[in-house]
């Protein structure tokens, strides 16, 4: 018996359960305040929270995370997190995109907030979807406008790392690990590319285990 289909079914079941957990957090209608019930609306296939008063359906959509991979004199700027999750671990400056801003604007804003650094966007570098946690990462290549940076409110330290010195044993997230590995691969062949991929956690592992992932459907151009 091939164990792979069973593992895939387990993985998809885990993803479905996580999605249901996210949906169940909406207990009251955001329009009228009425209580919601958990059901599959007519014409749909997924469980939703539906208002029992006005009938409005609450849709839970993925979050967009935007950030910058900042180059300066053959080094990369990383920030040490001063907040949970992954307190004390290193990450690229990144965070949730706000309403009313573009992905690039959000990435430069997050860089300023986390590293007090002004950057110029060079090009989009990667889109990484993480279905398990309902997030999509958009990472841009950028350069420092001037060689000034310091920890923002969510960072305890900011530092430029040579590629050989990147602290891969203390990175905050799988998305950061994947991004930096792809960047190093591009540097080795001498040409930056745009990457797309889906980060899936291996069945039975925790989202906090940053090495327990597969990069599926990887495309580059």
Image: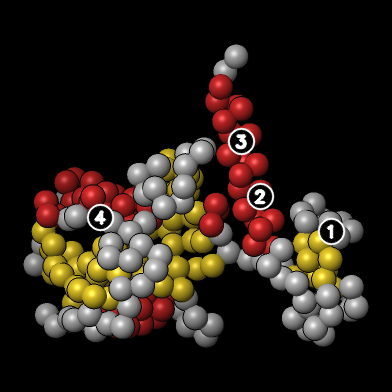
Residue 195 visible in the snapshot:
no
Asked if labels 3 and 1 touch by Cβ distance under 8 angstroms, the answer is no
Q: CA distance from mark 1 to mark 2?
A: 15 Å
Q: Quadrant of the N terminus?
A: top right
Report if the CB atoms under discs 4 and 1 are less than 8 Å apart. no
Mark before the other along the chain sequence, 1 or 3: 3
For marks 1 and 2 on the same chain, the one whose residue lies earlier in the sequence: 2
* x, y percent for residue 217: 47, 42
Residue 221 lies left or right of residue 201; in this view the side is left
Query: Going 25% across and 55% down the picture, which residue do you hit?
Result: 170
Report the residue marked by disc 4: 170
Q: Position of residue 22 (x, y in %)?
A: 64, 62
116 vs 143, nearest the viewer:
116
Q: State the residue position of label 2.
A: 17
Disc 3/disc 2 C-alpha distance (Å): 10 Å
Q: Is residue 10 above or below residue 169?
A: above
Disc 4 versus disc 2: distance between alpha carbons? 29 Å
Q: Which residue is mark 1?
A: 39
Q: CA distance from mark 4 to mark 1?
A: 42 Å
Q: Answer yes or no: do the residues labelled 1 and 2 have beta carbons within 8 Å?
A: no
Q: Position of residue 89 (x, y in %)?
A: 28, 62
Where is 105 relative to 59, above or below? below
Residue most extreme to the top: 1
Give above or below for 140 relative to 45: below
Asked if the residue under mark 3 is in contact with the one under mark 4, i.e. CB atoms within 8 Å, the reply is no
Residue bearing the label numbered 3 = 10
Q: Residue at x 77, y 62 (%)?
A: 48
Sequence-first disc among 4 and 3: 3
């Amino acid at each position: 018996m091939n164990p792979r289909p069973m593992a895939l079914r387990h993985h998809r079941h885990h993803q479905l359960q996580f999605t249901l957990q996210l949906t169940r957090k909406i207990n009251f209608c955001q329009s009228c305040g009425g209580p919601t019930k958990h059901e599959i609306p007519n014409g749909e296939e997924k469980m939703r929270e539906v208002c029992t008063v006005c009938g409005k359906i609450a849709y839970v959509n993925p979050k967009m995370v935007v950030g910058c991979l900042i180059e300066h004199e053959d080094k990369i700027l990383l920030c040490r997190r001063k907040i949970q999750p992954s307190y004390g671990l290193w990450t690229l400056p990144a965070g949730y995109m706000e309403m009313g801003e573009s992905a690039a604007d959000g990435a430069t804003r997050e860089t300023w907030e986390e590293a007090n650094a002004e950057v110029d966007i060079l090009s989009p570098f990667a889109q990484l979807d993480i279905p398990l946690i309902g997030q999509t990462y958009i990472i841009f290549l950028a350069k420092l406008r001037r060689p000034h940076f310091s920890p923002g409110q969510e960072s305890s330290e900011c530092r430029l790392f040579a590629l050989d010195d990147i602290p891969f044993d203390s990175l905050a997230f799988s998305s950061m690990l994947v991004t930096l590995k792809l960047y190093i691969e591009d540097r080795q062949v001498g040409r930056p590319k745009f990457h797309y991929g889906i980060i899936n956690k291996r069945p039975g592992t925790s989202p906090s285990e940053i090495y327990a992932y597969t990069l599926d459907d990887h495309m580059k151009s």
